[in-house]
Each structure stands twice: as C-alpha cells, then as structure tokens.
Amino acid sequence: MNRLFVTALSVLFTFGVAGIVYGQDAQQSEAQQTLLPEIDPQDIEIRSQFQARFPGLRRQPILGFNPRPRVFQIDPNRTPFFEDEETVVANLPVGVLERPEAPQYTPLGYTDPKNGFARLGIGSYISPEADIYAIGKINNRNRVAAQINHFSTDGHLDNFTDSRRSSEIGLNSIHRASQKTTLRTNLSVNSGFNHYPGLYTVDGEPASGNDRVERLGIKGGFNVDWAQTSLSGVQFSLHGGSNQFDLSSDFPELQTDDVSEWNASSSVQYSRLGDNIQEVHRLKINTSFGGVNDYLGENQSWSVTTASAHYERLFNYQTDVKASLGISGATDAVNDFSLYLSPEVTVTHTLFSGVDLKGHLSGTPSYRQWGSIHNENSYVSFSDSLQHQFEWLAFAEAQIEPISGTTFSGGISYQNIKNYQFYNRNTTSLVDSPGTDAHLFGVNYHDANMFKIYGSFAQDIRPDVFWVSADGSWQRARLSNEGKIPFIESLNIKGTVALRPFKQLVLQGWGEYVGGRDDSDGNSLSSFMLLGGSFEISLAERLGVYGKLVNLLGEEYELWQGYPERGFQGYIGITYLF
C-alpha cells in the first residue's frame, strides 16, 4: 500500500516539473520569435526633422556580433533638443491651401519646342505682325533668351496719313553663380512712330499737318538674389532707361525740339524667417528718379523713394496676412518735396474649401513718364509738366469655386488719388498759320476718387473641349469737383468662348462692350461693342496656321476723340516651333 502511494506521488511530481520547464521554454521561445521590442515611452526622442530615435530598441543578434545593448535612463522632465529655430522653420514643409497647379496644357497637337517659337502674320491695311521668342542653354549655370515683337500698319483713313509702327527687341539672361546666388539681366530696345491724323482744322475743316512722332527707347538692368531659403535672403536690383521723342510737322509752331527723358530705379530687400510656419520679416527700400528735357529745352527732375518694413504670416492654415508700413517721399517739377505714410495690408482667408475672402488697403506714390503716357495715348502734345500722384486703394473681394472647373469672383473697390492724371483735348490757334487750329491732347492733374463694382465667371463646360469666361465692371469715376473723368467709361463687359472640336483645332470668339463716356468738354461719347474670332490649326508637330477677325460688326468708334479707330480687319499667319 505504502509502495503504491510513493509511486503515485513520484509520477505526479515528475509531470509537474516537466510542465513548469515546458512552460518556461515556451515563453522563452515566444520571446525570441517576436519582433516587437518592449519600448519605454520615455526612451523616444522626437526631433524637428520628424525622425524618431529608440535608444532601448533590442535588435536581432547578428551572427558573430552580439554587443551588450546600451540603454540610457532619460530624465522625464528634460527639455527636448531642437536645432536653431530659423533652421527648423526653414526646413519644415510649406502648407498649400489652394489646389496644386495643373500640368502645363498644350491646346494643340504641337510637340514641345526645343529653342522657341515664331508667329508671323499679316492683316488688313497692310498690317504685318510678328512675335518671336527663343531660349538657349549655354551651360548648366547660364541661360539666355531673346524676343522680337513687331506691329505696323499702312493706315486706314482715306484722307489722312495715319500709318504707325511699334517694334521691340529684348535680351534676357540668367546666371546661377552658386546654389544660393542668382543673377538676372535684361536689355531691350524699342522704336516706333505714329501720325496725328485729323487733329488739325483749317477754317473748321479737318486737315493734315503731315505731322509725325518718332520714338526711340532703351532700358535694361539686373537683379541679384542671395537666397538663404526660398523665403529668406537678400535681393538687390538696379534698372534704368531713356526715351526720345521727335515731333515733326508742316506747321512751324509745332516744329519743336526733341523731348527726351531718362530714369533709374534701385531696390534692396532683406528677408528673414520668423518662429512660425510661413512667417517672414522683411525690410525694403525702393527708389526711383529721373529727368525730362522738355520741348523748351528745360530740365525737370523727379524722384520717389519708399522705406518699409513687412510682416507675413499664415494663421491656422486659413488666414494669410501680409502687412507693411513705410514712409515715402516724392518730388517733381511742379510740387515741392512731399512726405507720405505708405501702409499696405492684404488679408486672404479661406472660409472653407472653395471659398476665399480677400481684403486690401494700401497707400502708394508713383510717377508716370512720357514713355508710359505715349503708350496709352499716342496723340499727346508733350507740352505739359508731369507730376507724381499718391493713391489710396481699398478693396474687398470673394472667390468661389463650387465645383472643379467653375469659378466665380467679385468685389468692390475704392480709390482716392491725389494728382490723378487724365487727358484733355485742347484747342490751340496757330498764330503763324491763320485759321488753323490744333486739337491735341494735354496731360492734366486733379484729385479724384473712383468707386467700382466688379465680377468675373469662368467655366470649363467640358475640360479641354469647351470653356467660357466673362468679366465686367461698373464704376463711378469723379474728379474732386464732382466732374466726370474724361474718356473713362462707367460700364465695361468682356466675354470669351473657346471650342476645341478635335486635337488639332481651336476656335475662339470674344466680345467687349464699352459704355458711354464724356469728353473733356462734358459732351457724351457713344458706347460701342467689339466682336472678334480666331482659329488655330496644327498642320504638323511644329507647324500651324492661325487666323483672326477683329471688329466683325465694323463698328465706328473712337478711343480718343477726333481719331476714328480701324473697322473690320482680318489676319492670317503661321506658327512655327523650333
């Protein structure tokens, strides 16, 4: 009996020890097979580059190398390590609120140009036009580009000489001196001429004075960027130019000396990053100055200088604020030195996806030279002294994109302008030519204010096949004496429709309505509507044909009183990629 009891107890003891040993072996085997380490949260150190370091990580043993793991005890109340704050912010990714830019779209079946393209055509009234652009790569650090733009016409008036020409040749270059230093240069030469048809009267009847204005100009400069990051660094620019105008006429009183002008401008900007994402601090100085040698041979000088401090920041990934405060000084041949406060604030807020609100307030001085004035109105007399102007501008607008491909935008704006520049049509009796009057445009200045309501619409009805766009504005433009500003319309509406029935063909149509205006004497000028259309078809990968029709309705209208614009015109030309 005792022997049986001892035997049973021995068996139970043996199975119990075996079970314990087996369980321990199983736990050890399971521990060796798992790949998940036991990590204390205090052992994790997060760095600003979003890299994680695990000091207590047990790696799998390598055959022949099994060092003793180094486990560090870290103070739970320690201050985490960060790099220099500016370096941290500079290397963080920049958040993008808008949709990314779409890939570059080629509307026709052309291949990508290697060196440039050329568009050459001719239109009604013997009107050749040319746009040529070429780019070349000298080496990995240097690129150059050149362009030629030309337009001329033999004129469309039967009883007057009204031919004109406008040509420009430009050269640009980019030199990358180092990874952070870039030099950009530009140089261009322009020339042209135009006549003053029908702007003279003899005994009340329009007459031709065989008058002509020839223009020759040159401009150039360079920009240097020392970029620490894409948002910080130092920028310096220096530009200058000159223009010369030669007025010839059959009337001795209008045969004056040449009018010449020159200008120079320089800008220095220093930018540094703040402590927050997309926070930038800037200091900037701009100065522009120049002189005019007028038709009487007298010299007139002018200058505009602004020193400002800028602040930019993105708040909560929704509100983008750009603000600056500056001091400006301006002087010209008429006004003594004037000092202005020049603030600028622009706030863009994303209300929710597809709806952006924008507000702006700024005060800006400026000065327009004869080159800019002549581009706008070719019939000025060059006999006035030019002045600077200071503009207060405020606007609020909204942009809505309810669905992809459909965009609505609109807003209101208000401008208050000191020394606003506008045109008067002046009548001058020529003493040496009895009975002859000259009706040329003079440049006048007066304080003015403008209130405008504007809006636009764009719709891709079928992407890459059919799309439309339209914009319009209504404005109330008044001088400070409540008189209307001459030659400024109250209502303007534009629209464009484009159709691409197949890959090699694009058709476009457009229209513009310009409402009634007043001349300088307060008389009403009629409104007009212009319609046009164009096509372009690719005949090969590098060759295509284009055509356009302008003023389809043959509308008779005048942009500047006394000079009828061209009626119906047709153009045909070729496009070549090289």
Image (cartoon, rainbow, N blue to C red):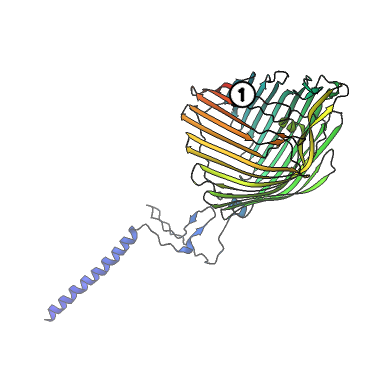
Q: Which image quarter holds the N terminus?
A: bottom left
| Three-letter code for the amino acid on which mark 1 is drawn | Phe
In percent of the image, x 23 and y 68: which residue is there?
18
* Residue 112 falls left or right of residue 450: left
Q: In the picture, residue 555 is in which quadrant?
A: top right
Q: Which image quarter holds the C terminus?
A: top right
Is there any visible trace of residue 242 in the rendered image? Answer: yes
Taking 14 as reference, is 123 above or below it? above
Taking 289 as reference, is 31 above or below it? below
* Residue 25 falls left or right of residue 41: left
* Residue 195 falls left or right of residue 172: right
In percent of the image, x 73 and y 33: which residue is there?
372
The secondary structure type at the circle numbered 1 is loop
Spot the residue most to the bottom.
2
Q: Along the line of sight, which residue is nearer the eye, 247 or 515? A: 515
Q: Position of residue 492 (x, y in %)?
A: 63, 38
Question: Circle 1: is it few (<14), some (14-19), or many (20+) Cα within 10 Å?
Answer: some
Q: Position of residue 172 (x, y in %)?
A: 65, 30
Is there any visible trace of residue 577 in the rendered image? Answer: no
Tally of numbered tags: 1
Q: Along the line of sight, which residue is nearer the eye, 456 or 186? A: 456
Q: Position of residue 428 (x, y in %)?
A: 83, 28
Q: Position of residue 153 (x, y in %)?
A: 67, 21
Q: Along the line of sight, which residue is nearer the eye, 370 or 242? A: 370
Spot the residue most to the right.
431
Q: Residue at label 1?
A: 568
